[in-house]
Image: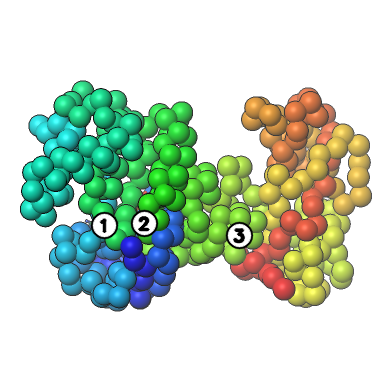
Amino acid sequence: MAAIELRGLTKVYPGGVKALDALDLVVPDGEFFALLGPSGCGKTTLLRTIAGLETATGGAVVIGEREVTDVQPGARDIAMVFQDYALFPHMDVTDNIAYPLRIKKVPKQERQRKAAEVAARLGLERLMDRRPGQLSGGQQQRVALARVMATQAQAFLFDEPLSNLDARLRLEARTFLKKLQRELGVTTVFVTHDQAEALAMADRMAVMENGVIRQIGTPAEVFQRPVNTFVAGFIGSTPMNLLDGVVRGDTLEVAGRKVAIPQAAGGRLVDGEKIVYGVRPEYLTYSAEPVDGAFGGTVAIVENLGASHLVTLESGDATVQAIVAEGGEPEPGAQGYALPRGDRALVYRDGDLVRG
Ligand code: ATP
């Protein structure tokens, strides 16, 4: 087991695309770290550069105590699971799991024993003679995981390993994978573009944009206090409400209403300056009656989320969304009011969080 450290890591592809821009990151020993960001932000490049499948243009990769920037992938002692699992179609499950051990010249009996032991942990023991084409997507994913586990590498790198699974299997797999990582305690970097997956699984996570890390933190930190409007809009199954406003003395004028200055921004704002007021739909209390400091509007859409509803209020050119508990949802066309929680609302200036 080992920590992973990136120092000023830069990757410029031939043709000039800067996929990683002087990136610094430390993933401590044993941590489950998720890398999240929109398509093309550099997640896969980052993972492949840690693995040595891409050569860094600048900076350094350190695994444990050893700088491995110029070390061949096979000698880095890390194991990677790809999106497509990369199983060998002509090999059965045993041989697929044991393949990395064969490369390491582990004797046949020993590698078969190891493959069987790991397969049993993943519930694959009755499938050992099958080939990948005779397995379901979820089973193939477990074989790919078993192969990684059998290598006993110092770190695991996962590149969207759950993206080929259907929604239900994906949920099961994510619980299972997290449990497994806990048990093994192996440092893991997990790439996903699915923010719910990152929030659910990671000890800590990074949100990337254009080759740069915009925020690193625990899922709770990133969810509750996004450091800029990009992260605020990206994280959360329903995006944060981001409303234009102006500071008016000791209150804010947001979407034509007077709103209290959120606690987090208290004392840091200048009268008359333009700001963006951010509050998650989960942190607005909905009411059918007018309330002081609430956003009022016409109910435009009511979306069923199961045990709650997402209500969209429109007023002039401002749109506010609020989560409303089962039974309290209004009818479209009604007047509604949404009161923000002052301890959860945030203020952004020039795109960056204003904080005490
Ligand atoms: P996705 O979620 O779509 O897989 P990603 O965040 O993993 O995206 P990367 O695949 O790392 O993004 O790509 C980062 C940037 O580098 C993109 O602009 C991409 O077009 C570019 N890129 C990736 N691979 C190459 C390559 N081999 N040659 C040139 N440019 C590349």
Crowd band around label 2 with a 10 angstrom C-alpha radius: few (<14), some (14–19), many (20+):
many
- The residue closer to the viewer here, 133 or 108, is 108
Mark 3 and mark 2 in contact (Cβ < 8 Å)?
Answer: no
Secondary structure at badge 2 equals loop
Mark 1 and mark 2 in contact (Cβ < 8 Å)?
Answer: yes
According to the picture, the residue beneath numbered tag 1 turns out to be 153
Residue 207: percent from left, percent from top = 48, 58
Q: Left or right? Give the position of 355 relative to 184.
A: right
Splitting the image into four quadrants, where does ligand 1 fall? bottom left
According to the picture, the residue beneath numbered tag 2 turns out to be 186
Residue 176: percent from left, percent from top = 43, 39
Q: Left or right? Give the position of 249 relative to 36.
A: right
According to the picture, the residue beneath numbered tag 3 turns out to be 221
- The residue closer to the viewer here, 51 or 259, is 51
Q: Left or right? Give the position of 135 relative to 129.
A: right
Q: Quadrant of residue 313?
A: top right
Image quarter (top left, top right, bottom left or bottom right) of the N terminus: bottom left
Secondary structure at badge 1 equals loop
Crowd band around label 1 with a 10 angstrom C-alpha radius: few (<14), some (14–19), many (20+):
some
